[in-house]
Image: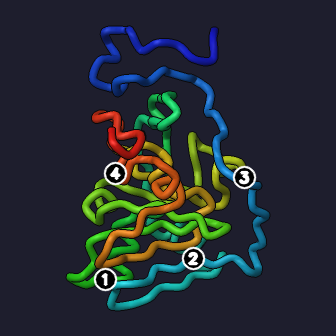
Amino acid sequence: MKHFKKADDPALQGRVPPGQYLTEKWPVLHYGPVPTFNARTWDFRVFGEVEHEVRLGWEQFQALDRECAATFVADMHCVTSWSRLDQRWEGIPFSKLVEMAKPTAKAKFVISHGEYGFTANVPIEDAQRDSLIALRANGETLTQEHGYPCRLVIPHLYAWKGAKWCRGIEFRADDAPGFWERNGYHNHGDPWKEERYWGD
């Protein structure tokens, strides 16, 4: 079987956005080196326009995962034109972070912060729509190449809109285009509208 195939099966209509190809594999795509994880120094922050800033060490983060882990299955769409159907994610619901930090009325945008200063931006409405801080995919712990120990998943947008190697979530009153947005990618990233690049 070829790595990629066209989504021309009538049964798949409505599941595969325009311009996408299907893959059963999970391509590895990122910019820069894969970070090294150190459980002693790693932490996760929720900050910005919130009533209560949150900072969790690795043990606390794992405990939160055990307390409220959720699972959902969603199709995954990459801006580079591949789609992977029925990806199974498991981790901490974004809604749990909202509950803990309590964003203020000023919070209109969410910035996910990854390693090496990488960021990705979305309107708060997108972040609150079935999003997850994923620690596992398809029953397995995330690999380092796919974002271990965790990544933000916003399934209705292109995959780059959630940071791999996620270290924090910032709530902001104003928008702040992230790394890829500053380098030509679309500021929103809806695969059904083919919002790949600025001007699309």
Circle 1/circle 2 CB separation < 8 Å: no
Q: Residues within 10 Å of mark 4 (few under 14, many from 20)?
A: some
Q: Earlier in the sequence, mark 4 or mark 1?
A: 1
Q: Amino acid at mark 3?
A: Gln
- Under tag 3, what secondary structure? helix
Give the Cα distance between marks 1 and 3: 31 Å
Q: Amino acid at mark 4?
A: His
Quadrant (top left/top right/bottom left/bottom right) for the N terminus? top right
Residue tagged 1: 102
Q: Is residue 91 visible?
A: no
Give the Cα distance between marks 3 and 2: 17 Å
Q: Is residue 188 visible?
A: yes
Quadrant (top left/top right/bottom left/bottom right) for the C terminus? top left
Q: Nearer the viewer, residue 65 or 54?
A: 54
Residue tagged 2: 44
Circle 3/circle 2 CB separation < 8 Å: no
Q: Residues within 10 Å of mark 3 (few under 14, many from 20)?
A: some
Label annotation for residue 192: none
Residue 35: image quadrant is: bottom right
